[in-house]
Image: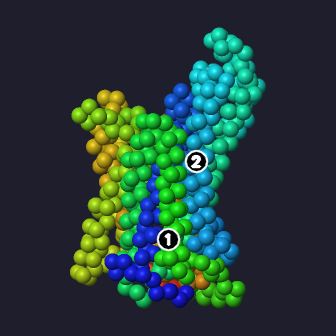
Amino acid sequence: MKVTNHRQVLGHPAGIFLIFSTEIWERFSYYGMRGLLVLFLSSATLEGGFGWTAGRALEVYAAYTAIVYIAPIIGGYIADRWLGRRRAVILGSMLMMAGHFTMVIPGIAPALVEWSTGYPVYAVLHESGIVLGEMSISPAAVTAMADYSLAQGWGPLNEGAVTATYLAMAWAFFLALFLIIAGSGFFKPNMAIMVGELYVITDPRRDAGYTVYYMGANIGAFAANLVAGTIGEVYGWHYGFSVAGLGMAIGLATFLYYSPKLMEGIGERPVYQRAQRPPLTPDERLRVLGILLMSMFTIVFWMGFEQGGGLLNLVVRDSVDREIVGFEVPVTWFQSLNPMFIFLFAPLFVALWGLLARRGIDLHPTRKYAISLSLMAASFGLLTLAYAEIERTGSCSAWWLVGVFAVQTAAELAISPVSKALVSRYAPKQIASPLMGAEFLCYAIGAWLAGQVGAWALDTDPSKAFIFLLLASLATAALCLLLRPVVDRLLEGRAVAWPLRFK
């Protein structure tokens, strides 16, 4: 694609800073949901939540995060063939904004009914033992609410108003999740690709442009739970969700106003070419197998990493001493530790890889994966020790969790950028996008498994889940090292020879 001469700011196309500012709000949206969702679903109805069991909340969180990372495969396909990338980003922003504002309905609907009819809906639901979020309400539940209303002297239950409110809360919640997922699917892949379109292929500033984009993502992730998370915990869940919607509205308005001026010719038209793609050669097929094999290793990593927004969120809420000089740290603030440590650690990792390369030590991707998975195992070792303290005393120091998030962030930096670089280096051009989609798919599988493991942990014993994740990470790290000869041959386009000679 021919790149138009764009206005320059600080030595870069001005459009990169528009993308930077818009990406802040998209990550603010995603990480705000990541921090609040499980807490909202598992909170009692009197506290404005849905009153679900923690296990059920983790399962919904797992499904949500998994589908969020599958949706970009579909969103990228639609943009390439029909919408164009810029329109896809605009549509995605609108859908996410609408989703966050729809999340407000479960919070305001009961208040409106109580104001108009006099019935305290939350109190009736809570005292009747009825959880929210079901797509239908049984006659037995209506009878239970009617009996409670009469027992309290409130008179006959306004069944129509209460039933309509209950159903509106459930349908609004799932509609909101659908809108946010669809919006993320359109936004995420197309914004990332437009970063590259601002620079010609040979432009040496290209990597720095992606660094600017990455910094915007982490600023949004860091701020999300300090702002939306705190508001949601302290003032009401629906206020936290609505703040994320307001942020997305700001990002959308900014992008709509400035993109025609700063991104002329970028992402305006679909890029699909009708010409038939050349078939893969035998060597390319082997490289594809090598990439897919490496991608499979990341599933175990993400299964451990995504405990951060699920099981660990509940551990922080229920079992961590969060009081510092009389101030109780909100649960959601712990979700900001990961992006904070990325800011601190990313330059160190860049320097480390550069230092090793200058000394002639170029770590093989399997070794970097093994380092990452070993660090992930170490983080669950720390959690096992922390949980032993919880079982002994009823709570543990917050510093245990700070250490866990620090180690997991180091593990992330050793595998996530490496996996994407591996795909971009070895993938045949004609199927590079689907192979990058396979990376998202592995993340989705890992996120879904994370929720299943978290729910199992709550049903049995969290320490067993921590030990399981520790052993699974170590076993996968060993497998990475063991299969290095296979990976080498496949990525070089050579058939695997047996017996293998392991190094």
Which label was assigned to residue 349? none
Who's the residue at 66% across and 73% down the image? 83
User: How far apart in space, not on screen, are marks 2 and 1 (Cα)?
Assistant: 24 Å
Inspect this view and state whether residue 145 appears: yes
Q: Residues within 10 Å of mark 2 (few under 14, many from 20)?
A: many
Q: Is 331 left or right of 105, judged from the image as shown?
A: left
Q: Total label count?
A: 2
Q: Quadrant of the N terminus?
A: bottom right
Q: Nearer the viewer, residue 470 or 235?
A: 235
User: Element at badge 2?
Assistant: helix
Where does residue 287 sit, x and y in percent of width and height?
53, 81
Residue at image mark 1: 258
User: Element at badge 1?
Assistant: helix
Who's the residue at 66% across and 39% down the image? 170
Q: Nearer the viewer, residue 57 or 503?
A: 57
Inspect this view and state whether residue 185 appears: no
Colour approach in the figure: rainbow
- Please, what is the three-letter code of the amino acid marked with disc 2? Phe
Where does residue 441 sit, x and y in percent of width and height?
57, 63
Who's the residue at 61% across and 57% down the image? 95
Query: Up-down: is 443 above or below 128?
Result: below
Who's the residue at 38% across and 47% down the image? 226
Residue at image mark 2: 101
* Res 444 → quadrant: bottom right
2 or 1: tag closer to the N-terminus: 2
Where does residue 277 sit, x and y in percent of width and height?
66, 86
Where does residue 237 sit, x and y in percent of width and height?
50, 39
